[in-house]
């Protein structure tokens, strides 16, 4: 199986939207697509798609962040979103996407890459570990009605 990785373009927006919904199914549609054009135009962001047999099968969103938890340098590359369609998982596609994002961050002068996921996202945690990431911190999120 050949995995082709390439930068996303505006034409990929509908597919990218679907993949974002795959990561954050409960987020409102407006929230999912409000920043897509800006991200593609930004020097500080990169979105890569993985293609197999001419079909998009996964994506990674990477960004330069001034601060990454557990990091010692700044800026750092940060994995903002990572998705592979369920039927294509376990074939190394996320690994290929991660490599592209890391190469991009390295090219931007970064020497560290950071990421996060939910505490109960076993597949993602294992995939991160397998790719050489190690756990540095656990966060708790809060909300108060105003
Ligand atoms: C996380 C995710 C992107 C991994 O994609 P993937 O293409 O299946 O990952 P890979 O095939 O490249 O696997 C990389 C390594 O992770 C590990 N891994 C991945 N999924 C796993 C699972 N379900 N159980 C155990 N280990 C797993 C494996 O060790 C694998 O290494 P190996 O192939 O040498 O065994 C995918 O599961 C996904 O899209 N999940 C839903 C969205 C999500 O949670 N995104 C992350 C939060 S932003």
Image (tube, rainbow, N blue to C red):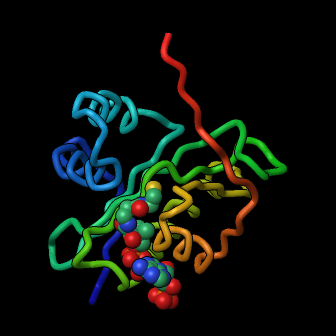
Identify whether 143 is placed above or below 24: above
Q: Where is residue 35 in the image (x, y as percent from the top left)?
A: 35, 30
Q: How many marks?
A: 0
Q: Nearer the viewer, residue 130 or 59?
A: 130
Identify whether 128 is placed above or below 139: below
Q: Note whether residue 87 is visible.
A: yes
Q: Where is residue 74 in the image (x, y as percent from the top left)?
A: 77, 42
Q: Nearer the viewer, residue 45 or 31?
A: 31
Is residue 58 found left or right of 108 in the rendered image?
left
Q: Where is residue 111 in the image (x, y as percent from the top left)?
A: 74, 57
Residue drawn at x 81%, y 47% as measured from the top left: 73
**Quadrant of residue 97 within the rendered picture:** bottom left
Is residue 7 found left or right of 103 in the rendered image?
left
Residue drawn at x 20%, y 51% as measured from the top left: 18
Q: Note whether residue 6 is visible.
A: no
Q: Nearer the viewer, residue 54 or 68?
A: 68
**Quadrant of residue 119 within the rendered picture:** bottom right
């Amino acid at each position: 199986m050949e995995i082709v990785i390439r930068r996303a373009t505006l034409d990929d927006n509908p597919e990218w939207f679907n993949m974002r919904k795959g990561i954050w199914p409960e987020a409102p549609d407006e929230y999912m697509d409000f920043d897509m054009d800006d991200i593609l135009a930004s020097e500080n962001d990169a979105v890569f798609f993985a293609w197999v047999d001419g079909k998009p099968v996964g994506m990674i969103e990477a960004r330069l962040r001034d601060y990454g938890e557990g990091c010692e340098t700044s800026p750092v590359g940060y994995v903002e979103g990572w998705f592979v369609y369920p039927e294509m998982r376990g074939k190394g596609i996320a690994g290929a996407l991660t490599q592209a994002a890391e190469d991009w961050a390295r090219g931007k002068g970064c020497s560290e890459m950071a990421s996060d996921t939910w505490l109960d996202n076993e597949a993602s945690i294992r995939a991160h570990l397998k790719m050489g990431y190690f756990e540095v911190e656990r966060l708790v999120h809060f909300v108060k009605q105003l």
